[in-house]
Image (cartoon, rainbow, N blue to C red):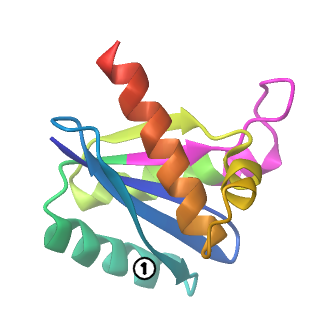
């Protein structure tokens, strides 16, 4: 099964793709947000091209693990993304941006999506 990870922010969406057969994840690119319809159209094309069957969307919980304003926005985005016809998994993304920065990612948003998906796949394997 192939997964498309999304690190959704107000201005950008970082993308990474991977599969659970080998656990290999690679960053794609970061999309500049335009509007919801355009963002979803681009994601539909990426999902088709990469032959993904599940979206994994990072959920930015607060440091205490609670739903804050940004997580509420991501929930609304995830609801809209369900119109793409793919299953949507929300996954805790705390610290992914910091870790991507520490790893020296050239594209921090895509790097955060990569780390998100690596962690997601590792937890699925256990």
Residue at the image point whose x is 15% and y is 69% from the top: 48
Q: Position of residue 42 (x, y in %)?
A: 35, 80
Quarter occupied by the N terminus? top left
Q: Is residue 15 above or below residue 66?
A: below
Q: Say few, some or many: other residues with alpha carbon within 10 Å of mark 1 (under 14 / 14 to 19 / 20 or more).
A: few
The quarter of the picture where residue 22 lies is top left
Residue 91 against residue 38 in the figure, above or below = above
Residue 87: image x %, image y %? 27, 42
The front one of 48 and 34 is 48
Residue at (18, 49) in percent of width and height: 53
Q: How many marks?
A: 1
Q: Is residue 126 visible?
A: yes
Please give left or right for residue 121 compared with residue 114 in the image: left
In the displayed structure image, the side of residue 5 where residue 91 appears, left or right = right
Q: Which residues are magenta?
A: 56-73
Image-quadrant location for residue 46: bottom left
71 magenta-colored: yes
Asked if residue 77 shows in the view, the reply is no
Left or right side of 67 for 13 = left
Q: Outermost residue, top direction?
A: 126
Could you say which is closer to the camera, residue 91 or residue 82?
A: 91
Residue of label 1: 37
Where is residue 11 drawn, in percent x and y?
69, 77
**Mark 1 element type:** helix
Quadrant location of the C terminus in the rendered image: top left
Q: Position of residue 43 (x, y in %)?
A: 34, 72
């Amino acid at each position: 099964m192939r997964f498309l990870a999304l690190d959704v922010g107000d201005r950008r969406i970082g993308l990474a793709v991977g599969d659970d057969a080998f656990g290999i994840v690679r960053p794609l690119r970061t999309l500049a947000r335009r509007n919801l319809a355009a963002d979803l159209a681009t994601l539909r094309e990426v999902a088709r091209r990469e032959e993904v069957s599940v979206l994994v969307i990072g959920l930015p919980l607060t440091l205490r693990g609670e739903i804050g304003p940004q997580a509420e926005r991501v929930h609304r985005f995830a609801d809209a993304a369900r119109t793409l016809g793919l299953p949507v998994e929300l996954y805790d993304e705390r610290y992914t941006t910091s870790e991507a920065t520490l790893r020296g990612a050239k594209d921090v948003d895509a790097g955060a999506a990569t780390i998100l998906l690596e962690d997601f796949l590792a937890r699925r394997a256990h």
